[in-house]
Amino acid sequence: MTSLLRVENLSKAYLHKGRWWAPKRIRALNNVSFDLESGQTLAIMGETGSGKSSLAKIIAGAERPSSGTVYLRGEPLKAQDYRFRCRHIRMVFQDTDASLNPHLTIGRQLEEPLLFNTHLSSAQRRETVSEALLKVGLLPEHAVFHSHMMSTGQKQRACIARAIMLNPDVIVADEALAALDSSIRAQIINLLLDLQRDMKMSYVFVSHSPEIIRHVADKVMIMRHGEIVTYEDTASVFNKPADGYTESLLQQTYTLS
Amino acid sequence: MPTPKLYYEERTPSPLEQVWVQFRHNMWAMIALHILGAIVLFTLFAPVLAPYSPNTQFTDALSMPPAWTEEGTIRFLLGTDELGRDMLSRLLYGARLSFGLPFLVVLAAAAIGIPLGALAAMSVGVKSSTLKHLLDVLLSIPSLLLALIIVAILGPGLDNALLAIWLVLIPQFLHATRNAVHDQRHREYVIASRLNGVSQWYLLSVVIFPNTVKVLVVQLTMALSTAILDIAALGFLGLGAQSPAPEWGSMLAKSVEVAYSSPWVMALPGFALFITLVSVNVVGDSLKSAIDERIKR
């Protein structure tokens, strides 16, 4: 059986404007490969600049890889083919304020994926939007709200509603929990776990917090300098960290939080 | 099960209505808006409102002061100039040249500049950056100077002055739109919309464009005041509207000779110009802060 998500030799280099004939090349990812099974949760950890965000963005399609391919059930995903990708892989961003359009109502924004990827009538679309809002613990009435009328937790719920709109297989969350305070964070984690149970989705979490990872993840990937240091089951990573870097990463955040 | 209609009773105002609500609370903005409305009325209905034709000369009433002075008569409410032409009629007709024409020029420049700017922002690479740097160079030259050069090439006259101002304003619109759209392109909600699989046209017109309205409103009002000022300045220098035309700038220029004997001939067009410019700027500024306020709440 082919795995749900397979990443092969993914590399990403950013060009920084130096002198124009010799732009500086910064390697964010270096030949990263891994598999993810359906229904599993992968957590990506690493120090700042280790390439974890780049990896998440490339999987979600927000960035193009310099080389390498992402396969979904054995099918390669093209970097610019948003229509196909968005039916299977969706993203939740870190900054809830910035990821909702201040000029459109929540309903209009949730409708977008339906408008362009399904043939539903406007009444059916509205129905689907209110179902999704109920699923994430909001009311159908929130569809007519603008994002500035909602609290941070509600905004994050709306973002999650947008992500589950097309019943995706994978949701990529790039530090989606970092900006929330602890009580809301707990609510959102429980919401995500409930959704995973109901909709059989896989998650790719980028996170700093070992507690959350221990709670939600099946597998943990530790990254450093754009390469995978460890890719193992959560229990074994936490019980006997393979090296000093992993240990300090888990340790350090323990003492901070 | 019927869904509870808790919030539907109280309709959420649309973004435009919210801006209007904000705008209405600002007293100065409303005063300026009313003045602007009056000027628009003068522009549209000058032939109905004006008591005389702007170029009729009353030889029995040369340099008649305004009606409220002792020598004035009610026949000429704002007096007459040295050739016996009614000042009120000239000012009303002048609104067409000094406010109406710049307004049309700004609309025409926006119609060209905004789509081109959006196009420039959505494209990447050498073409886009060449355009940007060329525009930056062009914008570093003051608009009046550029208009003067164009008029110098084409020759003086109102048509050429309008053409020159149109040409000067297009790059300003292009630049402002390009920057505004470019600034939006890498916002997270735009990326999120792109990940929703939306079309380029939808992305530009529904997702990005409403967020650039603030910049465009500011640009439109700034362009309008620039156009009004430049038309007047070119008229004053004798390069724009030519003498019998009741354009406020050229009226000012003519009045210099009689500034001491009949000061109202100079004061009235100057005052009209001043009021128009201030109203345009106040309305634009208040609109901008009203839009700001709406997003903040």
Image (spheres, coloured by chain):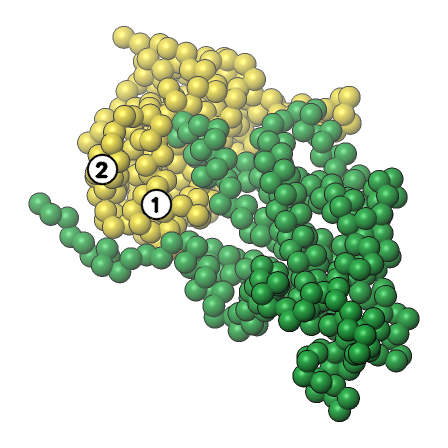
Chain letter for green, please.
B
Q: In the image, what residue occupies the spot 48% across and 31% down? A: B201
Q: In the image, what residue occupies the spot 42% across and 29% down? A: B198
Q: Which mark is residue A239?
A: none
Q: Which residue is mark 1?
A: A106
Question: In the orientation shown, which residue stands out farthest toward the right?
Answer: B257
User: Are the residues tagged 1 and 2 within 8 Å (C-beta)?
Assistant: no
The front one of A98 and B137 is B137
Residue A86 x, y percent position in the rendering: 37, 25
Res. B184 in view: yes
Label 1: state its secondary structure: helix
Chain letter for yellow, please.
A
The answer to which quarter of the image holds residue B32 is bottom right
Amino acid residing under circle 2: Ala
Residue density around tag 2, few if under 14, some if 14–19, many if 20 or more, within 10 Å? few
Residue B173 shown left or right of residue B185 in the figure: right
Residue B72 x, y percent position in the rendering: 74, 86
Amino acid residing under circle 1: Ile
Q: Please, is residue B12 above or below residue A254 in the view?
A: below
Q: In the image, what residue occupies the spot 33% across and 23% down? A: A88
Q: In the image, what residue occupies the spot 70% across and 62% down? A: B94
Q: Which residue is mark 2?
A: A123
Chain for numbered disc 1: A
Badge nearest the viewer, 1 or 2: 2
Label 2: state its secondary structure: helix
